[in-house]
Image (cartoon, rainbow, N blue to C red):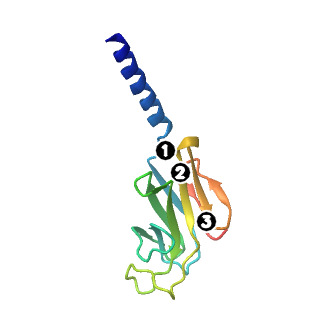
Amino acid sequence: MRLYFYVVLTSVMLFNSTALAQSPPFSTITITGETKNIFNKVCLFEKGSSKTPFKTEYISSNGKYSIDIEIPGDMHQYGDYFYTDMRFWRDSNDNGMREPNEPISECHFIIWIPSVKKLYLQVYNGPKYEIKSSPFKYDYPK
């Protein structure tokens, strides 16, 4: 009986410490900044080829934006990390569906790696920034 209790207690303690080690640095990250005034929305897409975003915020006429990303709620798991695809977009007819002739930025991946407890913004074929605080300021293009 004692051995069983010890094994169960040890297993619970290991599970809890692993779960705590994998919790994100923030439950929500707010990304704010400025962008070109050719864009009118900042959106989260499931992947780069998606036509419809699952989260959208409007960009003001002076190019300022802010978007909240729930971690891991707005992210998709891929192997040992989670990510979401953030893009700046000009929804010309405001129908919420991306069309071929509308200007759109390259992918901006928001990546959470639980094993190292780090969060990054990675521009497709571009720089990578560690996100150490929320809100996180990111101006596009730099």
Answer with mark 1 or mark 2, whichever residue precedes in sequence: 1
Q: Position of residue 88 (x, y in %)?
A: 53, 73
Q: Is residue 23 above or below residue 136?
A: above
Percent across and percent down for residue 132 are 59, 47
Q: Which residue is mark 2?
A: 112
Identify the residue under disc 1: 24
Marks 1 & 2, CB-CB < 8 Å contact: yes
Q: Amino acid at mark 3?
A: Asp
**Quadrant placement of the C terminus:** bottom right
- The local secondary structure at tag 1 comes to loop
State which mark lies toward you, 3 or 1: 1
Q: Secondary structure at mark 3?
A: loop
User: Which quadrant of the figure has residue 92?
Assistant: bottom left
Q: Quadrant of residue 36?
A: bottom right
The image quadrant where one finds the N terminus is top left
Please, which residue is most extreme toward the left here? Answer: 1
